[in-house]
Image (spheres, rainbow, N blue to C red):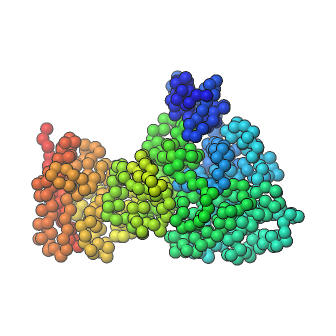
Amino acid sequence: MKTCKEIAEMWNVTERTVTAFCKSGKISGAIKIGKSWQIPDDAEKPADGRISSGKYIKSTKERKPLPIGISDYVRAQSEYYYVDKTLLIKEFLNQKPLVSLFTRPRRFGKTLNMEMLRVFFEISEEDTSKYFKDKAIWRCGEEYRSHQGKYPVIFLTFKDVKFDSWEATIDKIRSLLQTEFGRHQELLGSERIATFEKEYFIKIIEGSATEVDLTSALENLSRMLAEHYGTAPVIIIDEYDTPIQEGYAKDFYDEIIGFMRIFFSGAFKDNRNLSYGFLTGILRIAQESIFSGLNNLTVNSVMDEEYDSFFGFTYSEVHEMMKYYDVSDKEAELKDWYDGYRFGNEEIYNPWSVINYISKGCIPKAYWVNTGKNEVLEHVLKVATDDITERLYALLQGERVIARIDQNVVYRSLSEDPANIYSLLLVAGYLKTPKKELQEDGAYLCEVSIPNREIAAVYKGEILSHLMQIGAITRTTANKIAESLYANDLKKLQRAITEYMDKSISYYDSGAEGFYHGLVLGLVALMDNQYKIRSNRESGDGRYDICLIPRDNRYPGIIMELKSETGLSDEALESLSVEALEQIHDKRYDLEMRNDGIKNILKLGISFSGKKVIINHALSMKKE
């Protein structure tokens, strides 16, 4: 047996290409031992399908559509372009954990993968092996094929349980259980099922079960299925934490936590009538004791190497997809917008955005963020301290921030320690971890950054939206501020900031300088395509407040020094802005930009008092 590196040298390809071949099942006999692949010495190199001339010739063949919003495995793999993730089954059967929790961001293929597991494992009158015979799992041998179609399956997805009240939420859960019990009506005719069990079954089917009855639904159904089939079922719960997140946002958190604790305990804790259990979600929720005492639970998060390539698209999968749709020339743009995630050790693309980008004619847009509200960022902005706000702007400028990542973080923990913001943003898909180091307490010390241009656009939009909510700012006002800086029209800039102040009086009354600093940072956030925005950095003989470094020489560099005092007269406010401008000169804040070759620098001394603002300026130009 040889390693990927040895095979790569033999075949004159990259080690990454060989690893991709192994993961997609293209190398016969390749097996994964621990974290490394072992390949037979006589393995043949798979054909890569590339054209030797280097020119991509457009094909006239009819292509399958992309599966936008399709979570039905049978339809997805037969009617649409399907990225084969069936080796997830092999990985699972190799490890055989009793209960597995997969935490990944939304729209990263969790539901489709759970549907795939259901179709693979579930007993059916139909021969469902036909849906796998051309897939990678079938080439893995009888050891894995023997599990196909051999288990009763309980399947629930909570992805649409999004309601404003506990009453509506429990009604929806009642309806989902009614539908799932309805899939197993063969139990009503079974001689192996006791009469009292059938009576319970009928209550669920008729929708007359109480809330207490519903807490035992998974436990009771799993027992009846095991009695009828003589085989313990597989239980699959998709997006288990969606109603919990809604409960937090809509003030019925205690009710949903109390229900779920009993509901999941009956299904997964000491349940003899369980072959395997699968759950997916965004958060672990361990602190809420939903899985209290469940010592057979294996958690697989974005930080773990196991299963790292099965949620989202890998580089090789995207490469093949773009060749298929004859858009390989757009690969760099797609990577810039939708790549950058890191699950375990695997580089991952956002699958929802990739398929939308290709299907919409390769127009780069924020597709993923338009699939629902960005509650995570909303919560973050509400509790962010000045230091965290500063770091969020640093992230927006493409910088890395050091953060402690605790995978057990939940929404409630934000009020206890706002630093948990970074953990929440990571698991929800708003950050990536270029570097990580495991700590003794199980947390990670990480460098975190924004994954790609799509997520950068989300940050910018949400920060501006937050300012609009707290200060009644309009996008027109924000655009005026950006335009006035582009044009060096300082009178227009002063009017635009004053307009914002007039509409924000109830919010800014405290008049703290930190507020004005954050305000101006937010207002210039729209300019990050033209400028790199820096804040509180050392330059010259001190630390400037805000610096806008041009990405294009057509624009001047901009340095802002902000000062504020309460109750100032117009004359005193004018004097304070002059003092701010002189500080830029005296402290040589422009030294960093000068050293970087920026010739024209606009210096702004900005003073605030309540809702009043004065701007003084100087434009220095370096002669050739």
- x and y percent of residue 320 in the render? 57, 36
Determine the image quadrant of residue 587.
Answer: bottom left
Is residue 65 among what the camera can see? no
Tell me the residue at 78%/61% (across/down).
225
Q: Nearer the viewer, residue 128 or 40?
A: 40
Find residue 393 and report its image quarter.
bottom left
Q: Nearer the viewer, residue 596 or 482?
A: 596
Expressed as whole percent of the image width and height from the top left, the position of residue 53 reads 52, 22
Can residue 200 be seen from the camera position used here?
A: yes
Residue 544 vs 512, above or below: the answer is above
Q: Is residue 226 above or below residue 19?
A: below
Screen quadrant of the C terminus:
top left
Q: Is residue 533 left or right of residue 237?
A: left
The correct choice, above or below, for 218 with respect to 232 in the image is: below
Is 270 on the left-hand or right-hand side of 21?
right
Residue 66 at x, y percent in the picture:
61, 45
- Up/down of 371 relative to 43, above or below: below
- For residue 535, side relative to residue 201 (left or right): left
Q: Is residue 549 left or right of residue 59?
A: left
The residue that appears at 64% across and 42% down in the rendered structure is: 87
Residue drawn at (19%, 50%) of the image: 539
Q: Position of residue 579 (x, y in %)?
A: 12, 62
> Residue at 56% of width from left, 37% of height from top?
36
Q: Hey, which quadrant is residue 192 in on the image?
A: bottom right
Q: Residue furthest front?
A: 440
